[in-house]
Amino acid sequence: MAFLTWLESTGLSTWVREGESIWAFPSILTLHTFGLGLLVGANTIVNLRLLGIGSRVPLEPLRPLFSVMWGGFWLNAFTGSLLFAADATERGTSVFFLSKLVFVAIGVAAMVAIKRSAFDAPPDAPVGSPKLMALVSLAAWTAAITTGRLLAYV
Amino acid sequence: MFFGINIPHLHLLLNHVPTVGTVVGLGLLLLAMARRNDHLVHSSLEVLFAVALVTLPVYLTGVAAEEAIEGVAGVRPEAIKAHEAAALWGFMGMQVTGLIAWLGLWQSRRNSRTSRSTVATVLLLAILTMAMMARAATIGGEIRHPEITANPEAVEVGAPTGWLTSERIGTFVTDFPWVWPAAETLHFLGLCLVFGVLLAVNLRILGAMKGLSFAAMHRLLPWGILGLGMNLITGMLFFIAAANQYTQNVAFYWKVAFLLGAGAHFLYLTVFSKTWGLKIGEEAAALDKFVAMTGIGLWVGVIYWGRMLPFIGNAF
């Protein structure tokens, strides 16, 4: 708790939270939304394909989408850290925020697992069930967005 | 104010598009069916989709116009209420018509023949929408034109508004505390769908994922439309429940402007022949890449202005 209080009181956190500039909270939040669109949007495309949408379409060419996902992930890890620091005492103790982190972790784990099993493993010997992983991924991102969005209201 | 045109003025300029547009679209469709001309069928579906797009700002600016003339002498509030209720039906009818018209265009790209049942559905919906638009337009005219009012006594009472009115929708959204957050969540999920799909399709045109033909990417488009539909419905819930947060909000008008461009670009991706022909490994022409960049830029703009509603504008 002392750490959270300190984090929230740093100059950077105060600027993000209270800065009058459009580059403070508004732009960081907007970048966080773009990161979300990139990360979850690209994940959704791969998941839909694994679940059978356009199953005649080869999977391999979709590989560049993982760069999009990681780009979105790092953008949001960075902007998310700033947003967290700005409201550390509130976010750090919020059930919604902590469950959001868990869902993000599951989503990222599923993303890594899908890449390994459906893209990197030899096609004749896939590891695990890509379909199940796609379902877990869709559910985890839906839950992460839901809990994240509820942070603004609850 | 843009170029001396304020928002109520914009409503008066745009409000002819849905009424005249449904007639034109429907006329083209009937002509196409009489001539058994598939190209003309596609054109009529494209016209109806475009009219559905333009109907969005017509409805939105109408609410702003209502706020502007509510207190003006000689304006009958009953006529405004009745016009708004009729317009809401017309708006919804037009959006459903536009959606099915899009579906018909998407199907006809995939199969060489246009689906007859889809065209028949569009025909029926367009007739219904034309009637709803005509009603909305007639009542709308009576707000400021007593000289055309056939039955002035009836106007004093107001036309029947029916069960579905913007007031009822607004009450539903504000009475239950879960509706707004739930709709916001769906709005963000829809954002991921539509943004993800359009990013992937445009990236293919730009040269990433060249191992896929454009036709393969084209399969994804209905998922983009699903996201767009989710966001249209949830977005309208926000707008109807808290119109005053948006009608005076410059970020909102920018968002709608970018959305119209993005909608037109969506139609382009669905029907344009040159991109459709992109085979596995084939590079798109420079102009098509430019259009793809523009498409991504339009969606970035929609998200940017949407997120900036409370910061550059006055929402919440």
Image (spheres, rainbow, N blue to C red):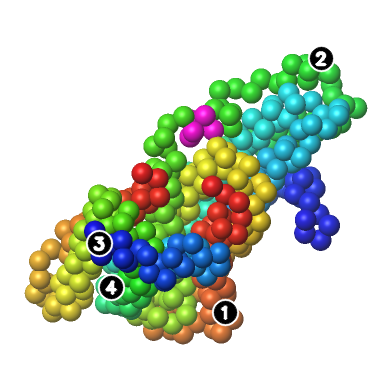
Residue B46, position in %: x, y? 61, 56
- Of mark 3 and mark 4, the one earlier in the sequence is 3
Q: Chain of mark 3?
A: A
Q: Chain of mark 1?
A: B
Residue under disc 3 on the same chain as residue under disc 1? no
SS assignment at label 3: helix
Q: Quadrant of residue B81?
A: top right
**Type of the residue with mark 4:** Pro
**Type of the residue with mark 1:** Phe
Above-or-below relation of A130 to B208: above
Q: Quadrant of residue A97?
A: bottom left
Q: CA distance from mark 3 to mark 4?
A: 52 Å
Which residue carries the number 4 mark?
Answer: A58
Number of numbered tags placed on the structure image:
4
Residue occupying image coordinates x 43% and y 65%: A14
* Mark seen at residue A2: 3
Q: Is residue B181 left or right of residue B256?
A: left
